[in-house]
Amino acid sequence: MVAARQGTKFRGGLLDTQRELEDLKKVMSQLQSTITSLNRPSHEITCLVFHSPRGQTVKKLYVLSDLLTRYEYFRACHSSDYSEAHNSGGSPSQQSRGVVEKTCIEHNEDSDDEWDIDEEEHEEAHTKFKATIQITDTSRRTYKAFVDYALCGALYFSPPRSSYRSYLLQVVPGKVKLAWPEWAKKYGTTHTSIPGFKTFTSAKSMWRMADMLIIPELKAICQEEIMSSLKVENVVQELQSKLFRTHVEFRFKAYQFVRKNWKDVVCKGGIERMLTNLSPTDAHMITNTILRHLPP
């Protein structure tokens, strides 16, 4: 029996090692493709121009065009139907043919725009790009994290802003409060660690990106991260956030979390906000997911 258990344990360890080797091979293959692509001329590079929703700040990110054109969303702005894009950093209202503007949407509560410390990339004078795309609804940091993921699988998540707000409320008076970037890096989570690639991003921002580009695997990873970030201290705040209000699958899982932690959530306060102005759909979900399972 002992020998059998040891044999089973050995085989299990061997399978884990084989899976790790297969993952490593995939990463090395992706990195080799990246190195080869970096030797291409600048006209195979796409310039993304980001316009902050809170001001006139403009930042740029330079991405391999082949990487973007893997996704249908970006193929139109790289097609022959568009003229060669200019590389100016003008506002979206000054677009010319070949420069695609994305519709500006409501600023999201967990947007990566909060990271104002990101350094700007520098371009050589008179550089021409295969395309220049004006971005107004997604932050540069989200795109940078997405590019890292697309290149080699690296993926790092910052905590939700609701957790940071809870932290600020708990800081003892007189004690120095950590700024958001420092706190987020300290308490962020790592999904896939790749040396040289480390861009923390909001799981909500990346989920929206994966949804836009139709990447089911990345979308599922982000959804798992979002749900694992639910805590007794922040679940009510999260239920009132834009992503949860918009997508019923998030609210359903959040209500399940509330049911499992009902007493602790009630003790934290704010439960009345969750039960106010409910839609018929949410009233039905709360009744069937929470109220029917509470002790008399």
Image (cartoon, grey):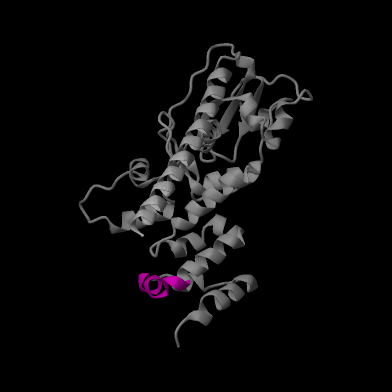
Q: Which part of the image, by quadrant, shows the C terminus?
A: bottom left
Q: Does 54 sit left or right of 47 as displayed? A: left
On the question of residue 57 being in view, the answer is no
The image position of residue 106, as x and y in percent, is 59, 48
Q: Position of residue 101 (x, y in %)?
A: 67, 34
- Where's residue 70, x and y in %? 66, 32
Depth check, front residue: 77 or 3: 3
Q: Which percent across, then down, holds residue 254?
A: 50, 64
Q: Measured along the vertical axis of the image, is residue 232 above or below residue 90?
A: below
Q: Residue at x 42, y 37 (%)?
A: 193
Query: With 294 as the anchor, is 86 left or right in this view?
Result: right
Q: Is residue 98 visible?
A: yes
User: Residue 98's quadrant in the figure?
Assistant: top right
**Residue 90 highlighted magenta (yes or no):** no
* Residue 14 sits above or below residue 97 on the image: below
**Residue in the image at 41% along x and 49% along y:** 159
Give the camera-side residue of 113 and 41.
41
Screen quadrant of the N terminus: bottom left
Outermost residue on the right side: it is 81
Residue 267 colored in magenta in the image:
yes
Extent of the magenta region:
259-268
> Residue at the spot x=60%, y=15% of the render?
42
Q: Nearer the viewer, residue 284 or 215?
A: 215
